[in-house]
Amino acid sequence: MASLFAYANPKRFMDLSAAVLPWLVAATVAALFAGLVLGFASPPDYQQGDTVKLMYLHVPAAWTAMMAYGLLALASLFSLVWRHPLADVAAKAAAPLGATFTLLGLVTGSLWGRPMWGAWWVWDARLTSFLLLLFLYLGYMALWNAIEDEVRAARAAAILALVGAVNLPVIEFSVNWHTLHQGESIFRAGGPTIASVFLWPLFVSMAGYTLLFFTLWTIRIRTEILERRIRSLLLGGAAA
Amino acid sequence: MIPLFLRDIRLASRAGGSAALALAFFAAVATLVPLGVGADLRLLARIAAGVLWVAAVLAALLSLDRLFQADFDDGSLDLLALSPLSLESIAAAKIAAHWLTTGLPLTLLSPLLGLMFGLPPRAIAVLGLSLLVGTPSVSALGAIGAALTLAVRRGGLILPLLVLPLLSPAVIFGAGAVQAVLDGLSNGALLFLAAFSVAATLLSPFAAAAAVRLNLAG
């Protein structure tokens, strides 16, 4: 674990992330652009027509929103168990991003649902559990903002994030009972059920969204570290 | 642990009568629904389980901010933390007392409301059973929220936002169990509810204790 903790040092993180960030931005732009081009170039679906292209915006957003919660919970675990300040910063920085991707997933899903299901919103299990994911993010941020002491806020929020993480699979599996939403079609036993003309643009888009998340996450963590440094400098100046 | 449990029950029954208030709230919400959606008994029977489950969760939520708050404010929680009891067992005792003074009375009142909503007897039985099995998870997960918001001014406003998403499985399975009876289906929801409730009740004291410890430290 020694090597892991070496990178958890804020100074090292700043150096490393400064070196990696330009490449990350370049990769994100390239992947998002390629996903867009490939998505537009892909043929219309025989049933869904051109609206199938919303998939390249919707599915990656939903995937990123879930991944963000996983990372948030992981960072919270590190923060609680090893008390590392960088894990606090990472968890705090992930929440608004995750909430935004969740909202994006809800909005694009709603736009897709209108032509497909004939309704902007359907109270089915997957949509509702996704809305609950948004509330989990909002509650996390509200709790963080409500507690003034930074260390205490971080640890309280971390406890909440972990409790929410235990609960998340239960919400997710409720999909299997009654749902209008299509079932799992990509990562399933026996291979994907989507034709490869759709699958490749989708994978590129998912890579683009994922990279976008990591780029923004890195930037937010860097900003938060700098803000804390400025604050401690100001406090030091006030005390002198 | 048992004296603490008994003390909390005495406090709940004497000071403020939170159990009676939670019951009154439960009944009042359930009464408003037919006024809102109309008196069609067939429709009311369809939605009864969902309405009663949501009302029960909200009623239990109302009394949650008292779970640790009063003891935190007057310093008894500090003394309890100094006692040989672990914070985990203190949290467990308080969760048990909370359930006995809110969850159980709500469960006992529910058959009457189910009858008024036009539920058939078998469905009423399952409704009562689902509340009996499920409400411990409401007290347990609610205790985590109450402990987290202990040092927050106006924490009662954040509490529902923190706790309600966590309680969604209880509502889904609880109402689903009754729905399955109405539809004449075999009932797996009750088992899922029981599993959820057991897991929540076993794990919550640890999370709640961690949150209390955090708030006592400062």
Image (cartoon, helix red, strand yellow):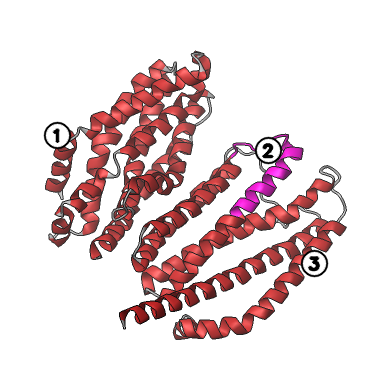
| In this picture, residue B47 sits left or right of residue A32 | left
Residue A36 coordinates in the image, percent (x, y): 79, 61
Q: Secondary structure at mark 1?
A: helix
The residue carrying mark 1 is B14
Give yes or no for contact between labels 1 and 3 (Cβ–Cβ under 8 Å).
no
Q: CA distance from mark 2 to mark 3?
A: 29 Å
Residue B177 disc label: none
Magenta stretch: includes residue A119: yes
Q: Is residue A153 above or below residue B182?
A: below
Q: Secondary structure at mark 2?
A: loop
- Give the amino acid type for the residue marked by disc 1 in the picture: Arg
Tell me where residue B117 sits by quadrant.
top left
Tell me where residue B30 sits by quadrant.
top left
Q: Earlier in the sequence, mark 2 or mark 3?
A: 3
Residue A86 coordinates in the image, percent (x, y): 45, 75
Q: Secondary structure at mark 3?
A: helix
Q: Residues within 10 Å of mark 2 (few under 14, many from 20)?
A: some
The residue carrying mark 3 is A34
Q: CA distance from mark 1 to mark 3?
A: 68 Å
- Tell me the residue at 24%/57% (across/down): B88
Q: Are marks 1 and 3 on the same chain?
A: no
Residue A146 coordinates in the image, percent (x, y): 38, 56
Question: Could one spot residue B2 in this view of the protein?
Answer: yes
Q: Which residues are magenta?
A: A102-124
Quarter containing the N terminus of chain A: bottom left
The residue carrying mark 2 is A120
